[in-house]
Amino acid sequence: MSDNKEEDQIKYLAHIDGDREQTMEEHSNGVAKLAREFAGQFGKEDWGYACGILHDIGKYSLKFQNKIQSDSSIQVDHSTAGAKLCFEMGGFYHILSYCIAGHHAGLPNTGSALDGANESSLMGRKQKNIQDYSAYKKDINNIPELKTLPFDPAGVTNPPFSLSVFIRMLYSCLVDADFLDTENFMKNGQVGRDSGENMKILLKKLEKYISKWLNNKEFDTVNGRRTEILQNCLNSGVKDKGLFRLTVPTGGGKTLASLAFALKHAVAHHMERIIYVIPYTSIIEQNAEIFRTILGDQNVLENHCNVDYENSEEFKPMQLASENWDKPVIVTTNVQFFESLFANKSSKCRKLHNISNSVIIFDEAQMLPNDYLKPCIAMMEELLTNYGTSIVLCTATQPALTEFFRKDLHSAELCPRMNEQFSFFKRNAIHNIGTITGDELIGKLQQEYQSLCIVNRKKRAQTLYTKLKGEGVYHLSTTMYPKHRKRVLAEIRGRLKDKEKCILVATSLVEAGVDLDFRSVYRQLAGVDSIIQAAGRCNREGRNVSEESIVSVFQFDGKEYMPGQRQQMDITHSLLADQYNISGLDTIDKYFKMLYHFRGDSLDKKKIMNEFKNNNYNFAKVGREFKLIEENTKTVFIPVEEEAKTILQELKYQGFTKLGMRKANQYCVNIYDNEFEKYLAAGMVRLVSEDIEDFYELVRLDQYTEEMGLNLNIDLGMAVMF
């Protein structure tokens, strides 16, 4: 008991809801038990429990109890107390201090011993004078013992980085447990969460769905080859956890095959979930729809910028699950996945512990971000080594990533007779036609009936389309807002299906996740993987002879590089000059090896790996800097449709909300700063509101057309005359 009688008489509370109270003892025990359960997924129950018990001991101060019980305006720090206690205890307990200090504000940088009490770093927090919290001993008699090591030091290549990942995972366990216990109290147990069905049930659903296909033994037909790949993936599911590759040509059915492997593997190893990591939202939407059809809506969570679960009670369980990925199948983006793993804020990190003990499928693995490839691979290796995951690199153009993983971490190929499959599914022939003029390209396209032409720049696409336009000629690029693009794509698909004339001039947005089937394709020089993706739109369904289905690779006079693609294009140019078979598996491997060699240190552009070493962990700094998509564009809202005009009015007069911005995204175009400056100087755009940066509306609506979207041929001297 305390010597202070006033303290002895206080009921220490964590939360109050009307006349209902949650005591500190109830909350601490509730969080500790949940955090122990979550950390148990990677064998660290003791760490999770200790973190949960100690995280809120600062609430045992009289000042905090005054705040919660009588005056909510009182400002009091309750997070530093547990962190300071962990420092005082020494040993491994200091690791917990990061999680406890940051469970509201975010994981801090370590800082230095010179940091003062006003600094937000962990060392600064250590210097801070805080309220007496010793009354915690009233409820916590024994500090839980840490019985295990954070990880096996013999099994990792970079111990400081491994420790940083362990801290993040432990932090995730704590903040999710804290959220869930608090939510359960505040909603009096009426939460409405639904974790979906277990993996055994989902595997049975898949087996029922594919049962007829598995009877097909004619391996020299398209469906027979797909069945062979599918069956091999299903059979391989019982293999030990680890790193896998699924290298399947276009048309080989890799989406279903990868799901079969993942479900069988998850059941065989008692794994919790399957996470699909995909570069483009268009592929996400397609794959998620397939998964929902097979597994049921309640078992598949899409988590990306274009999905909204907040607009009705019907989607409430999905909205809740999106906070912590508590569903059996998650479909997300590279951006969401990796930025969460390198984040420091609780809202993004909360889901991380649910990545452990999962099967992770990287679809279109060649799209892993080159600027951050080394930290991304290091994170993948951590997930494989210490968090019970299996990883599948799934693509038709397998990147040469082996050299970046630990030497003893070998990858197993899941595609049977891989070389034969690529020969069988060969749908076209790739020809290098060298340097041509724009007029020569137009002349070639005018002779075609159903042809796709992909160029590197949006302005080039608009110029070509303007010279070509006529019946059956279309333009498609990100100068058109998403809803507009979907409408045009539907019209293009209709013409192709009805065997009508269809010439499409587009940018690279049609290369992946857009199922189009043209008789011929023209592709401006790009990376080998981009060219092969483009080739996947030529004779996709195999209706024509492959030798007569030509993919023509061309270049214009002068260097015309895509942003961030200079080395990719130069290497491809070199391989073509040396007459390599651009679609050969050996050539693809050589291309990626050359690319990674030339990129060198720029495979960690922001030097992320240097921020975790020498017992100095810059969580907050990395959280700010690890951005897969650099913000060098401005967003322009296009209010040409009635629905768009209504959304714009709501944003202006009712304020900016997440739901409102998600609706607005369907009518937005992102343009590079140099193009935007021309629009701004001409008075053709204006800021929507001072409340949000870099969000503008188009005021000269004649600069947006149904044919080409936003006109990029704007001169600096142009101006709006009123």
Image (cartoon, rainbow, N blue to C red):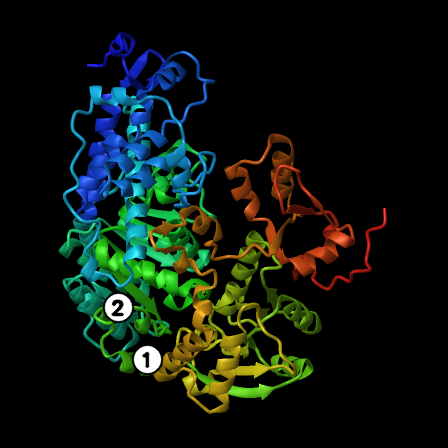
Does 574 sit above or below residue 196?
Answer: below
Residue 227 position by quadrant = bottom left
Among numbered discs 2 and 1, the one appearing first in the sequence: 2
Task: Count neighbours of disc 1 (C-alpha within 10 A) and say few if under 14, some if 14 to 19, many if 20 or more.
Answer: many
412 left or right of 670 in image: left
In front of the other: 139 or 41: 139
Task: Count neighbours of disc 2 (C-alpha within 10 A) and say few if under 14, some if 14 to 19, many if 20 or more.
Answer: some
Q: CA distance from mark 2 to mark 1?
A: 29 Å
Please, what is the three-letter code of the amino acid marked with disc 1?
Answer: Phe
Q: Position of residue 602 (x, y in %)?
A: 47, 68
Label 2: element kind: loop
In front of the other: 633 or 74: 74
Report the label total.
2
Residue, disc 2: 406
483 left or right of 330 in image: right
Please, what is the three-letter code of the amino acid marked with disc 2?
Answer: Arg
Residue 23 position by quadrant = top left
Classify the position of the N terminus by image quarter.
Answer: top left
Label 1: element kind: helix
The residue depicted at 60 percent of the width and 50 percent of the height is 668
Residue, disc 1: 422
Residue 296 in sight here: no
Q: Position of residue 76 (x, y in %)?
A: 42, 23
